[in-house]
Amino acid sequence: MGAIFLLIAIVVLIVYLSLATQCVRWVRNTSLSKWPFRLTIIFWILLPTWDSILAMGYHRYVCTTAPDIGLTVYQTVKLAPKLFDQKTGKPLYLDKYGSLDKKIFGDRYELSIGPGDRDIGYWPLLVRIRQFDLIDHQTNTKLATVVDYNPRGGLWWWNVFFGRLGEPRGIGGTSCLGRQERGNLIREILVKPFVLDNNNNFDGSK
């Protein structure tokens, strides 16, 4: 199915560029002023991109105004010193993938997509809120949350040609926190709620 989408996209792009080129040349050869020529170029540039430009602008607005973006720690859990590197303080309870090590915690803690994962707004001014919650199943407590927003509007041309084939989408590919920073925050959500207990008062691995 992906090869079909790619083939259709290439054909559409070739047809679009051909029409745009012919139109621009015709206006340039027939117009006595430069403005029709310039406006024609702007038209063919904005035709497939205007909604994506609006979507990106709205997404940036949300990123600067939404109060819930980032990491929030609601409750901490004290762990024994043995779960931290004695020299660096680096946590030893994460596996090689950066997730909580089930060999240590079992199924007690889970990082899951929270109930806030939903679309907000109307196309093309549409964003998706992404929420990840760190849950303590033993105490049924939400320890921390990380919230991010992705753009969902734009790409009207994709939805026109591919939406009926079951592949509607928005521009996506970015977020308020950025992919790398969001990944760091997700790792922080697995680290910050757990604190070193020098007195060994509580071992959260039990």
Image: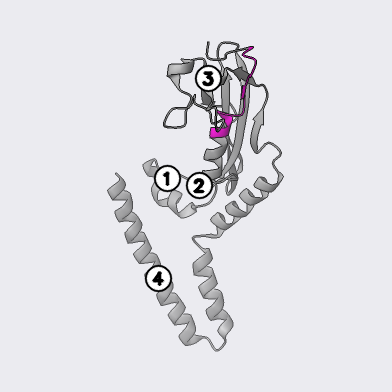
Task: Looking at the image, tell me whether mark 2 or mark 1 is earlier in sequence order.
Answer: 1
Kind of residue indicated by mark 1 = Gly
Residue closer to the observer: 131 or 46: 131
Residue at position x 44%, y 19% in the image: 102
Secondary structure of the residue carrying numbered label 3: helix
Q: Could you tell me how far apart the alpha carbons at marks 2 and 3 are, in whole angstroms? A: 42 Å
Q: Which residue is mark 3?
A: 82
Gap between marks 3 and 1 measured at Cα: 53 Å
Between marks 2 and 1 in the image, the one whose residue lies nearer the viewer = 2
Compare residues 20 and 200 and report the one nearer the observer: 200
Q: Is residue 190 magenta?
A: yes
- The kind of residue on which mark 4 rests is Leu
Q: Which one is in front in this view, the residue at disc 3 or the one at disc 1?
A: 3
**SS majority, magenta:** loop
Q: Which residue is mark 2?
A: 172
CB-based contact (under 8 Å), mark 4 and mark 3: no
Nearer the observer: mark 2 or 3; the answer is 3
